[in-house]
Amino acid sequence: MTAQAERRATAGPAFAAADEPAELGVVVVTYDNEAHLDRLLASLRLEAAGTRMRVVVVDNGSSDGTVRRARAHADVRTLTGHGNVGYAGGINVGAAALGDVPAVLVLNADLVLEPGAVPALLARLHRPRAGVVLPMLLDRSGAAQPSLRREPSVTRSLGDAVLGRFLGDRPGWLSETVRDPTAYAWAHPVDWGTGAAVLVRAETARSVGPWDERFFLYSEETDYCRRVREAGWEVWFEPAARVRHAAGGSGRGPELTALLQVNRVRYARKHRAAPVAGATLAVTAVTSLARTWDPGHRSALRALLVPAARRALPRGRPTGLVQADGGRAAAGPGPATRSAAPARVTGSVVVPAHDEAAVIGRTLATLAPWARASGVDVVVVCNGCTDGTADVARRFPGVRVLELPEGSKPRALDAGDRAARAFPRVYLDADVTASPAAVAATLRALAEGPWLAARPAGGGGRRRGVRPGARLPPGAGPAGGPAGGSVGCRRLRPVRRGSRAARPVPGPRRGRPVGGRAVRLRGEAGGRRAAGAGGGAPGPPGAWCGCSRGPPGARPRCGR
């Protein structure tokens, strides 16, 4: 590229560098978008005159000149080499690279922002509960695209399958697409909308978690907006923010049609009961069966009914930030938000990990930004790992990573104890996602209240404790216990200082640790750990003790 062409590409206000403050972070996910990228970046530069923004381009393995065009912009960070991780994966990669910004604007590469779009989006985000803001999308002629959607349901899928674009003014329960022109004339909360342009508050991104990478393309925005609403935030439509959308920037073809239909069913299976998911599969399959003249629907029908064909659809390599099972792992920019800085909390979180590269990013994305801002020490102890667990953990600023050659969870916990800098302590499995609010409330309760230790309480049997991927949502704990200490729908059972521990923690035996997949919490005076009972592997005597402790200095009830 000539120097003159490079100067033309970067004409206009400069974007913020990584070490400069920014009011907005922008993630652009590209795939063969050479023809579109310069126009998008030029429109962003005009907006940068009034809004300081940091821009990251995430290229998903383009085969054209997209990367060359992106690198012509010296003030744009271009990320390559991760392969095609899909749209959701690309967003996760880009958001993790943005640093501390109050909000993240996710954009398709085939967009052009009209003047004033960014200020209008940010103004709407100032509403206290606005977590996501969607702009007005315009087609090439300047007409409004029907980009707003209602929450998917069986009747809406059936109505869209039978009627398509006909009878556009049909009742809302028969259509997922919002076609009423008046709905595009005023700002209001919505269920979700097309993910071509999405503004997300940083605080919302951390509380909701990464975009679910199982939705390689299509339905990822449906899933994300639902999780935003379930977390107590609102999704807003702002018509004053106008964005021109060329459409088709993601490509076309039978595989993408099949992926669209399969992800409808995948979404229903994730969020709805089995009968509803089954009905969704039936309606979707019948829809494709009625359109078998189209190669895409023939591929979709086969993918819906044949597991091997479904597995052959495009999928990305996990980034380590995948939102795999509905747990709300936080991901995105650092701790800077429009609200006050997090209060300081004293304590440590110890995370033992053995070959957990696929899930530990989810756990740390929840904890690391909050812990770094709040003063909580996070230690990851990789024991006998043969995958990239340590590399994923080191991506998170403030997290200390220890590597042990032997695969032993008790030794990993002991090493984490020696390395941890503060009490109280939370011992968290690498595949358990805990919300910052719950961890903070529990640490404060253990530090300030009468609580010696706590463990997940639940029904009897081997599965007592926390299931893999469970989360600690904010909320009240047991009566008199640590607030915010619930685990899923279970409660943390507290142990008071000075009590005789009326009930020991079930499950321990001499020479056997308790826990397995669990959350363990300990105050400085706790001495031994209290854990959720479950089938742990044999360990050296004294490595674990599940008994509640009596008065300070008293001998534990198990005799150790």
Image (cartoon, rainbow, N blue to C red):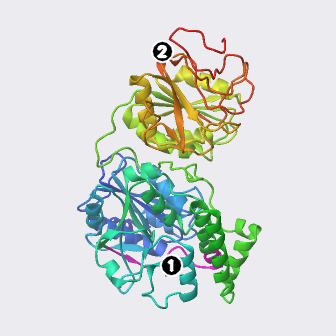
Res. 332 in view: no
540 lies above or below 81: above
Q: Which residue corresponds to the image point at 73% horizontal and 76% vertical from the top-left? A: 302
Looking at the rendered structure, the kind of residue marked 2 is Gly
For discs 1 and 2, the disc positioned in front in the rendered view: 2
How far separated are the C-alphas under marks 1 and 2? 67 Å
Residue interval drawn in magenta = 242-258
Quadrant housing the C terminus: top right
Image height of 267 relative to 485, above or below: below
54 in relation to 556, above or below: below
In reply to whether residue 342 is colored magenta, the answer given is: no
Give the numbered dot on residue 164: none
The answer to whether residue 286 is visible is yes
- Disc 1 marks a residue whose amino acid type is Gly
**Judging from the image, what secondary structure is the residue with disc 2 in?**
loop
- Residue 402: image x %, image y %? 58, 29
In this rendering, position of residue 357 left or right of residue 242:
right
Q: Based on the displayed image, in which of its 4 quarters is residue 314 positioned?
A: bottom right
Q: Which residue is mark 2?
A: 498
